[in-house]
Amino acid sequence: MRTILFALATFFLMAPTASFAQSAHADLRYASTESSPGGGDFDASSLSGQVALGEHFQLDASYTQADIANGIDTFGVGAHVFQRNDDWLFGAYAGFDALRDNADTDDWVVAGEVQFYAPRATISGVLSYGETSDLDFQVWALDGEYKHFVTDNWSVSGGLSVGGAESFGDSFDAWGASVGSEYQFSSHPVSVFASYRLSSYEGAADQDNDTFTLGVRYNWGGETLRERSQSGAGLERVPGPYERVFGGY
């Protein structure tokens, strides 16, 4: 199974070489999460890619290995469909995650997306709902992000989210906050990025997650970061329920 999933992920990541792909990127990232109470710390590494197909579609693919519950392998795919002009984007998203090894379950998530483009900023909003099979787990979330372009190839961002979860009759309130930055080198189509995210769940049981992420990204299409955000493969993957509960790695 792992070989099949990795082959599918490689297919999506190789898609930018096709003639129809005008904007795409592949990421390699590492995330470390500390959870409290209980000290449930874990690390995760992932390989992911996003490809813009024409003016109205974007495909996402990801493969993640996390040392939760003695190891979980996750393969995810997602698709965005949208209408975009120079000022706005309106769209919808559907995603699916298969969690294997020590967590044999599946996630799915659907979302509505909106973006506003300013000369030096992209403002995003996402309203999503997701479920996890076999675990009777449902999550909804409203995420907002402000991304400012200090230069065309250097961005800094801040985000807030609110939401809720329900599992086996127990309800939880959730909120989160994040900061991040990305820098693309002028001489190579490579960028580096880092982020910090705090997420908190309160209800029948309380949990706080602190997640630090570092990564490197290879970009196709000859775009600046601002161009990718506002006219290319700039829509973010929407996390599923399992990923949200464990810090949005």
Image (cartoon, rainbow, N blue to C red):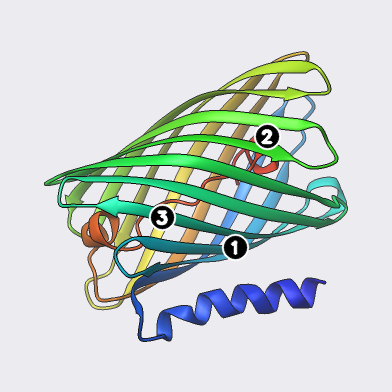
> Which residue is rendered at x = 83% and y = 36% of the image?
135
State how far apart marks 3 and 2 are (Cα): 26 Å
Mark 2 crowdedness (10 Å alpha carbons): few <14, some 14-19, many ≥20: some
105 left or right, relative to 235: right
Q: What is the distance, in whole Å, between disc 1 and disc 2 at their CAs?
A: 18 Å
Amino acid type, mark 3: Val
Q: Which numbered tag is attached to residue 81?
A: 3
Numbered mark located on residue 245 in the image: 2
Q: Is residue 241 visible?
A: yes
Looking at marks 3 and 2 on the same chain, the residue that comes earlier in the sequence is marked by 3
Residue at the left extreme? 119
Label 3: which secondary element: strand
Residue carrying label 1: 62
Task: Tell me if 178 is positioned left or right of 136 in this view.
Answer: left
Residue closest to the eye, 232 or 191 = 232
Residue 205 appears in view: no
Percent coordinates x, y for residue 56 in the rendering: 33, 60
Q: Which mark is residue 6?
A: none
Mark 1 or mark 2, earlier in chain: 1
Q: Say above or below: 78 vs 175.
A: below
Tell me which residue sits at (78%, 16%) in the image.
170
Q: Amino acid at mark 2?
A: Val
Q: Name the kind of residue labelled 1 in the image.
A: Ser
Q: CA distance from mark 1 to mark 3?
A: 18 Å
Question: Which-is-in-front pick, marks 1 and 3?
Answer: 3
Task: Locate residue 69, reporting x and y percent.
Answer: 85, 46
| Residue sitting nearer the eye, 239 or 39 | 239
Residue 120 percent location from the top left of the image: 15, 46
The quarter in which the N terminus is drawn is bottom right
Q: Is residue 248 above or below residue 78?
A: above
Q: Choose mark 3 or mark 2, whichever is in front.
A: 3
